[in-house]
Amino acid sequence: MLKYITKRILVTIPVLIGVVFLIFVMLSVVPGDPLTVMMGEKVKVDVIERLTKSMHLDDPWYVQFAWYLWNALHGDFGTSYKLMRSVSSLIANAFPKTLMLAVTAAALSWVIGIPAGIISAVKKNSLVDHLFMGFALCGVSLPAFSVGMLLQNIFNGILPVSGFASPMHLILPALVLGWNAAGTIARLTRSSLLEVLEDDYIRTARAKGVAPLSMIINHALKNSLLPVITMMAIQISSLLSGAVITETLFSIPGIGRLAVDAINGRDMPLLQGTVIFTTVVIIGGNLAADILYCVADPRIRVEGGK
Amino acid sequence: MKKYLSLLLAGAMTAGVLSGCGSAFEDSTPAASAQAGESTGAGNETAPKDETAGNENAGTAGGNVLHIPEKKEFPTVDCQKDTEFYVVPLNIYDRLVECEVVDGVATIVPSLAKDWEISDDGLVYTFHLRDDVKFHNGSDFTADDVVYTIERMMNPATSALNTDFFSMIKGAEAMINGEAEGVEGAKALDDYTLEITLEVPFAPFLANLATPSCSIYDRDSTEAAGDQFGIDPEVTVGTGPFKMESWVLNDRITLVRNDEYFKGPAKVDGVELIQVPDENTQKLMYENGELDIVDLSSSTSQLAYFMDNEKYKDNLVTGPEAGNYFYAFNQSIKPMDDVRVRRAISMAIDRQTILEQMFNNAGHVVNSMLPDGVLGSYEAEEIVYDPEGAKALLAEAGYGDGFELEIYQKTTDPADTLAMNQVVQSMLGEIGIKVSIKQMDEAAFLAERREGNIGMTRAVWWADFNDPDNFLYTFFTEKNTRARSINHTNKDVFQWLEDARAMVDEDERMALYQKIDTIMVQDEAAVLPLYQMDHVVVVQDWVKNFHIPWNGWTDTSYYAVSIER
Amino acid sequence: MATFEQAASLAARLAVDSIKDQFSPEERLEAIKKAEEDELNYMPRPDTLREKLRSMCRENKVAAASAVVLAVMAFIIVFADKLTSYDPNMVNLMERLLPPSRAHWCGTDDLGRDIFTRILYGGRVSLLVGVIPTSISMMIGIVMGMVSGYIRQLDAVIMRLADIVLAFPSIVLAMVVMYTLGATTTNIFIALSMIGWAGTARIVRSQTLSLREQEFVEAARGMGVKKWTIMFRHILPNCLPSLIVLFTLNIPDAILSEANLSFLGVGTQPPDSSWGLMVSQARTYAVSSPWMLIFPSLAILIMVLALNFLGDGLRDVIDPHMKK
């Protein structure tokens, strides 16, 4: 087990370096530079040219890449060009917002998704099934900003529709994200429960007159929830990596917005910082999901271990 | 090695983040800051973290504090390093002189400088400074601080963006190129006498000194603050009517009154600059009384709502913007190199209809690049809407069958830019020009424009300082015409723009600027001036004495504003 | 993702085990017998794809209805120019922001354009963006996945590449691609293909891994059939059913991704419209003129919901073990 985890962590090293490398290559290809963005309308060619030199922005990308790795190795993730603050402090400022949003959204998605999935599975192909799945799927069937705008419209004046000043501000964006995640959860709950329900033994048990509800709760649900739980681990990690669109729509200064601002400002240190951070979170989430399996059932060996 | 790298990467980032956890809703609530504001006599308290007021109350207006929404977070309030956000600098620093509307005319008035003399050749400016001014940290304001401010701007280590506001001073270029330790032309004759010598005469110099970028800093504390100046409220010190008290990133900046202000204390206890990026939310918060002043000209989507609503008739404060919207044509892209094509495009755009239908008629159509209210503005000949004439011109130029044209814009432009470009697309379609709109992300757009490669595009310029130089020099000098993708080639204009700067006779100088403007707009149709908009701001009933500044900027000083409930 | 498949089968096995424990061996034998009878009598296992589809239509009416809805939508979108007399891009400032009426079924937008017409034409973009990048990304994913699963030397490299793509925030990656190449419809296809292949590759890889050990593949190998022939002739056809399901379920993702890109300003370019762009342009007017927001949202909702129902229905009958 320990060996497996170590191996998995080691495997993430090339992935992380690959991500850093990819960003350097991409940003060296994309037109635009941070200073011109900072200047905005007041473009002053002399100033830009002089500062480009003094800030070493004209170094070839591989030199910048090497410097970045060297500094990162020493725990220095640089200073954002545009926001003039250390990247770690900016991430530390943004992450709590993303974290609260993610946790609320995840909780909402379970509250909506799991019951919807169970009811749909029990009443497979009935009207109830389609209604519940339809409701859950609506969250995944509209772009987040569309759901968000509709909610903003409906709750205009009732709930705060933008910003992040109080817990009330969390409700609408969490609903958008949570509804979206609920669709996936409901689907997975339904299909894994169905699979268990349709198993020969269960059908037999049913034929033998075991009460359906207690059977579902005692046997089927317990087992079919395992994939759902691991799905949750993965979903939380993807929520933590920042919901760019939702954060933009609701003006929440979280990780996703930071990443988008960083690209738009060609702010290399900030983009590197946010992407490394989210990559670590995502990889960590996947690892946690896989470990959950191993813990739950040693018969499973992940990653092609057959 | 690799292993340690990744562990470090992951570890350092996680550690950094965890330390910031648990405080997602950092609030210095208005109530708290209002109290802080009332007790400013007690001195500089650090960021108040008063938890007694609930989070739900965040933003509730009240007390004697102004609540102002801001759409974007500022990178820094050090206005030597920023070209966009001036509201904090305007309120916490002072300049040697200010530009204010006196009897309806924008005029240069004394501020930190009591009075001044200018030598006959226009090269030497001698300023007599006030001797009763103190910085927020208690140290005296002297001529040496001004010299320091100038040298800090020109010091390569500062990485300042606004060097051009001081670069006409003798020896400034030498310092920024690393050839000198100081700026030769900036001298403190004694504590309260300052002598500035220019490289060559620069007629708009005084007006130029009134821009926020020329704010005066304190030598000792600013030197000690290093790169934290402008970021850490503790060390960001000026002489202005307000002091910076706290800055909660992505939430709010709190300013409190400077009771020692040399022009007398401000009327309000403080100003809260609250991050409210969404325009609709700004409207809702205004209606709940959570915001005292909302700038509608920068929240255009809410303009119609307030302007059409009888209820708010008396709450609107308007004033002209000293700035123009215009379309810039790129003469290095065919067929815009042909003046007849440029004129045809100008004639085919129905500016009046667009203004009425899309912008609530809140402004007027202009035919010059010098907007009303700016020195040297004049009555220019009207560019008439005449699609038939435009078609004839195109035929004459050999484009009777039309051609393809690209209009460029940024993806981050406000929604009305795209809407307007689509209207123009449709209008130009009427005379056979097949327009496509090319949206580029801001960074790519600006980079390409700097290289002179952007096609027709809508732009806007508001006065930094009150002089035609600030407009015409910005667009039409040899360097700038390329950097703004206009690419005109009139060598006379290049020369005249340099000449005009050194002219001492004001009438002659203005006449020359008007000539340049007529040539560029009327004869060459290098640009199509569109509108001068009225700046519209909605204020609560209790907000008194709020005026649109002379330049019509959103960013303004709240020194004179009072709250009377 | 492969892990979900494993999780699902694990869950099934655990359920079986837990029930096993409660019955004596005789009871179990009886139960198995009875279950087999059940199977024979009531649920003849459909063999061919066609029969599976038929059974889906019989059992899952919503999936069948979704297929019909999709066909109708496709028809309307393709024949848009025959169905409306308005020009989708004609600006008419005198008819700005009109509510729905007989003349304008869905009202007009901020530039006086007929929203119904723009939905019809915008559907073309959305439909293309759904189908084309999904096809490209799946082709890339299939090749990558098969190579990774069959040619073991390349496995690590390809899978790490897929890991990078999957770990990278996809919208950020797509934005950078659009910035680099410029915002055109073709480049949307490229950007979406570049982020979409990794998921397919993982699924195909895991299927290839199990298929390559099967007898018919080993037999082919024994007969000296070339690697690539085995992959494309023997392995690919066996992956097809799950690929069809995956395809149906990937299209909505692509449509929504395009919408997100449009929201961020780097998707479809005006005056052309896609549904996503129409919704995002409604942002300013969402409160005052809600029809600008509601109708294009409905169009997306109906199409994507139908695709999701159809995909889920297909999966239920074709490949119940696949999870997305």
Image: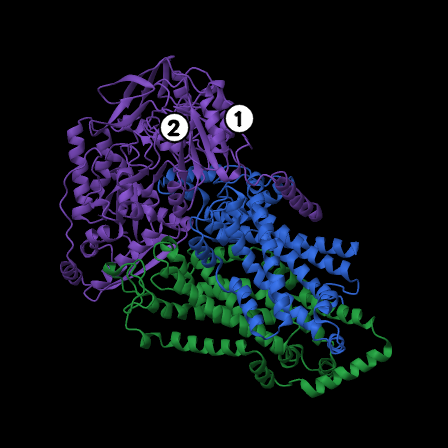
Chain colours: A blue, B purple, C green
Query: Which numbered circle lies on residue B59?
Result: none
Asked if residue B477 can be seen in this view, the reply is: no
Q: Pointer 2: what residue?
A: B91
Mark 2 vs mark 1, foreground winner is: 1
**Quick one: B129 or B66, which is closer to the camera?**
B66
> What's the chain of the residue with tag 1?
B
Secondary structure under the numbered disc 1 in the rendered image: loop
* Residue B542 coordinates in the image, percent (x, y): 33, 32
Three-letter code for the amino acid on which mark 1 is drawn: Thr
Where residue A303 sits in the image (x, y, percent)?
A: 72, 63
Q: Are discs 2 and 1 located on one and the same chain? A: yes
Sooner in the amino-acid sequence: mark 2 or mark 1:
1
**Looking at the picture, how far across and down is residue B355, in whole percent?**
23, 50
What separation in Å lies between label 2 and label 1 (alpha carbons)?
A: 19 Å
Seen in the picture, residue A128 relative to B239 is either above or below; the reply is: below
What is the secondary structure assignment of the residue under circle 2? helix
Task: Tell me the quarter of the image containing the N terminus of chain C.
Answer: bottom right
> Which residue position is annotated with label 1?
B46
Above or below residue B476? Residue C85 is below
Locate residue A43 relative to residue A109 in the image: left or right: left
Please name the residue shown 40% across and 62% down the image.
C294
